[in-house]
Each structure stands twice: as structure tokens, then as C-alpha cells.
Amino acid sequence: MARERAVYRCQACGLAAPKPGTCPDCARAGSYVQLVEERATPARSGMRVVTPAGGSRPQPLAAIDSDGGERIATGIGELDRVLGGGLVRDSLVLIGGDPGIGKSTLLLQASRALAERAGPVLYVSGEESAGQVKLRAERLGIAPAGLYFVAENDLDIVLGHVRALRPRILVVDSIQAVYLPGLESAPGSVGQVRECGARLMLLAKGEGIATFLVGHVTKEGALAGPRVLEHLVDTVLYFEGERHHAYRVLRAVKNRFGSTNELGVFEMAERGLAEVANPSGFFLSERPVGAAGSVIVSSLEGTRPLLLEVQALVTPASFGTPRRTALGADYNRVCLLLAVLEKRVGFPLQSQDAFVNVAGGGRVSEPAADLGLALAVASSYLDRPLRGDVVVMGEVGLTGEVRAVTALDARLKEAGALGFTSAVVPQNNLRGRTGLPIEAHGVGSVDEAVKVLLGP
Ligand code: TYD
Ligand code: MG
């Protein structure tokens, strides 16, 4: 007979070890995390209840009906797109994000249309009382008949409610706040999060209930994170944004039912989250036209080209090592571009502090924004503004060459739709091209782009 043996589990990454101590995996990454004792799960018999009767049966692939997934629209266009065209019937969706970013608000708003179209919806909150949620729902004007609410932390009781109410959609807010009393570890610990997630997965698949899980993540991943759930669920969405900016971005990082890298943009307003139908316009709304150091770049987010304003401020360094700051852009990328400007264009940036920022709390993650970042720095250094009606795109290499970007047409079309009349693009993108949506000027190097846009 197998001896019951304690397992020691890392609270950050979920690693299991037979002995107490610190997690060797996390130690290699530079953080020392205590392994916490976790007793073996008392038999998984409780989980059998929700498995489909009769078990599984192998079938020839040709004989299987394809499951395009019956989809339910959430009534929030941006959320539907990120999900891949609506919520799939028995899918498990994890929505992660920093506390206070608006996850509960988003799901409450989505619950409205879901309850109206496909109810009943059961919203389980382990964090807020019924009164608190009601107050928010009133503020958002949400009161559909098919929306049920329960404030509960004990997952066994929740599963009981699910069996009684038979909802088609279940929201668990949050996975860190619910627990299984049969496990010894504390609510929110890796063991609890994993086991609760597994139970809910079996429930979703077994009973055909679309389930949303809310998970808080901290930047350091210090909290026993929902990262251990990422393998388990069908879809992982991250809700991101700067706390002090109104805009929020919903990103799919994993999706078994649609494209990843899709992006939905929202604005946190007085009455909840509002969809931003024209995100480029939103990011460019306060653009100072004709100011040195401001450049409009095109950044492809999923299939969607976004126009963002990149700003740079270059000032003489007062002493010692010059300062470099990058907000909304990769720090190392910015340093690389400063070095390219120094060596290939001849700007003495070693004696200058350089600050780079993406306006409105936006973020550029694509190499296609390189040329725009470099030109913003050059424009600020020379104190000469670019023309206001030009968009810049291109990847910059270490020899100062400008490399081709993907999806040129989509980017130019978006720029044209927002009133831009010309673009500076990589020369290589223009070979043999005619009939572009707006006028495009091809450049082969950063040096050339600086001369074209800022003068000799
Ligand atoms: P919440 O959905 O509770 O965040 P999470 O569940 O991710 O922790 O959102 C909380 C923030 O949203 C809070 O700081 C207030 C703000 N908010 C608004 O600005 N307008 C609104 O209509 C609502 C409901 C919230
Ligand atoms: Mg919440």
C-alpha cells in the first residue's frame, strides 16, 4: 500500500518536492520561495460526479462531427472578438489581470447580455458581498431576470448551487478566493487554485457550462498565481492597462477557439467599461501637432493596426551616465536605437538624457515601431518637428538599415482612415507596389529617414 506522504509545493510556480526548503527552480531565476507542505488530496472521488456517463470511446476521426463550437455573443463586441467570435458553450475562460483593473466590471457587463440571450447565468463572488455587487450592477444599469448571484467561498457549496440552478454560464470571481475544504492548504495557494480549477474544468466540460474564471496576477507573480491554470483552461485573456489611464486592453494569450494576439480596447468610464471602436483615434486625441519629439507610429496588435503617438525628450545630461527612460516601449530596444542613432547617424547622444513615452498609456511591442522611436528621439534632439500628417513604420537593424514590416496595406489603410495623407515606410516594402491606400515614401536607412523627415 502506498504510504501517504506530504508534498512540499512552491507557492510561485507549483513545483512539487518531497522535502521542505526553497524552490530550486525559482532560486535559479533569482527569487527564494518557501515550499509549503500540502497533504495529498483525499481521493478524487468527488470529481467523478461530473464526468459524462459511460466515459469516452475512441472513434475514427472521419466519423466525428466537427464542433465549430456553439457560440454565444456576450453583447460586448470587443470581448466577442477576443474570444474568437463569442463564448463557446463548454469552454473555460481565465481572465487575469492586476487587482482593480476592471475584471469584475467586465464580467458583470458581459453577464447582462449572456443572461438575456442564454441565461441563466450564475455569478459567484468570493470577494464581494451581494450588496456590493448589487450596488455596482445598479450603477451599470444591469438587472436582467436570468442573472443569479451568490457570495460564496466554499467551492463544494458552489458546485451544489450549480447542480440545483443548472446555469449555462458560470462566473467565478475569483479563483483565488474560492477553496475546497477537503484540502489543507490555504485559499489562494497553488494547491487550492489548481484543484479548484480542475474541478471547474470537469464541471464545464461535463455539464456544458461556459465558465469564466477571474484570476489576480501581480507583476512579480508573487501571489500564488493563476499561471498554474493556464494549461488547464481553453482560453487565457489578460486585462491590462495603466491604473491612472482610462484605457484598458483585453488580450488573448491562449485560445483554443480562435486567434491569439487579438485585442479589445476599452475605456473605464463613469458607467463601467465602454468599448473603444476606434482605438487609434482614442490614442491620438490629444496629439500636439507640430511639436518636436512627437511621431505617429503604426503598431500591429493581432490583426489590427493601431496608430500610437511616440514621444521623446532629449536633454543635455547634467553629470555622469546619461539617463534613459522608456515608458510603453522596451527599454533595451530604446537603448539599441539610441546607439544606432549615435553610431550610424552621428548624434552625440552619450551626453544626452533621453526619455521615451507612448502617449495615453499605450504600448508598442512590435519592431515596426523602431523607426518611429528613433525619429522621435532625433526630432527632439534636433528640436525640429515632423510634419503632422505623416505616419512612420519600419524595423531598424544594427547597421542602421530599415527592414520591411508585415501587413503594409492594413497599416496604410488605418492611417488613411484617420486622415493621414503620407507615410514613411521601408524601401523593401515598396518593390513593385502601386495603388497603395496613401502616399508612401520608401527609406533604406535611419539616416535617410532623418534627412527625409527632419531635413539635412
Ligand atoms: P473592478 O471591476 O472591481 O476590478 P477587478 O475586479 O479587476 O479588481 O474595477 C474596479 C475599478 O474600476 C475601481 O477602481 C473603480 C473603477 N470603476 C469605474 O471607474 N467605473 C465604474 O463604473 C465601475 C463599476 C468601476
Ligand atoms: Mg474584482
Image: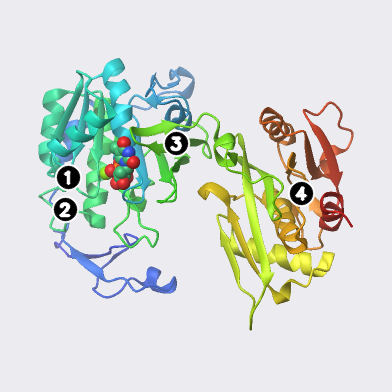
Label 4, residues with CA under 10 Å away: few <14, some 14-19, many ≥20 = many
**Residue plotted at (68% across, 65% down):** 314
Residue at left offset 31%, top offset 70%: 33
Earlier sequence position, callout 3 versus callout 2: 2
Q: Which residue is mark 4?
A: 386
The tag on residue 282 is: none
Say what amino acid the circle numbered 2 marks.
Thr
Could you say which quadrant of the image residue 116 lies in?
A: top left
Q: Amino acid at mark 1?
A: Arg
Label 2 beta carbon within 8 A of ligand 2: no
Label 4 with label 1: CB-CB less than 8 Å: no
Quarter containing the N terminus: bottom left
Task: Report if the CB atoms under discs 3 and 1 are less than 8 Å apart.
Answer: no
Secondary structure of the residue carrying tag 3 is strand
Q: Residue at x 21, y 52 (%)?
A: 192
- Residue 89 location (% of width, % of height): 34, 24
> Cα distance, mark 4 to mark 1?
65 Å
CB contact under 8 Å: marks 4 and 2: no
Q: CA distance from mark 4 to mark 2?
A: 64 Å
Which numbered disc covers residue 266? 3
Classify 10 Å Cα crowding around label 1: few (below 14), some (14-19), many (20 and above). Answer: few
Q: Nearer the viewer, mark 4 or mark 3?
A: 4
Q: Is mark 3 within 8 Å of ligand 1?
A: no
Q: Residues within 10 Å of mark 3 (few under 14, many from 20)?
A: many
Element under disc 2: loop
Q: Are marks 1 and 2 in contact (CB under 8 Å)?
A: yes
> In this figure, which residue is indicated by the disc labeled 1?
44
- Earlier in the chain: of badge 4 and badge 1, it is 1
State which quarter of the image contains the C terminus. bottom right
Q: Quadrant of residue 427?
A: top right
Mark 3 or 2, which is nearer the eye? 3
